[in-house]
Amino acid sequence: MTKLVGISSFTSKKGNPCYTITTLADCTERDNEVGRYGQKAETLFVDKVLYEKLKPQDCGKQIIIDYEVTGTYARVIGLSVK
């Protein structure tokens, strides 16, 4: 289960608006195999449309994230809060 633990908006050094979400998830078996145990936090950049779907009250709730992979780059293309 992945939990939403933070949402943030800020301005980059170049003056561009940026939007992030921070999630917390249990480590997987693959994580354990490389020496990571417990839970892991991850901060992901999202676009403004996805960011605006979220509310501060969503923090602490389960989140499902949809990704699109192009080459070696993955980006968030959708999310839903349970």
Image: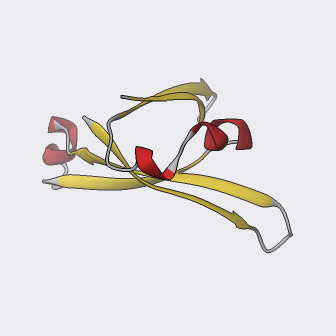
| Residue farthest along the front direction in this orientation | 57
* Horizontal and vertical percent position of residue 70: 65, 27
Q: Is residue 4 left or right of residue 67?
A: left
Q: Is residue 25 left or right of residue 36?
A: right
In-front residue for pair 58/27: 58
* Horizontal and vertical percent position of residue 73: 61, 37
Q: Residue at x 27, y 54 (%)?
A: 40
Judge whether 74 appears above or below 8 on screen: above
* Horizontal and vertical percent position of residue 33: 14, 44
The quadrant where residue 6 appears: bottom left
| Residue farthest along the right direction in this orientation | 15
* Horizontal and vertical percent position of residue 77: 62, 28
In-front residue for pair 23/56: 56
Q: Quadrant of the C terminus?
A: top left
Q: Residue at x 63, y 29 (%)?
A: 71
Judge whether 22 appears above or below 58 on screen: below
Q: Quadrant of the N terminus?
A: top left
Q: Is residue 75 left or right of residue 38?
A: right
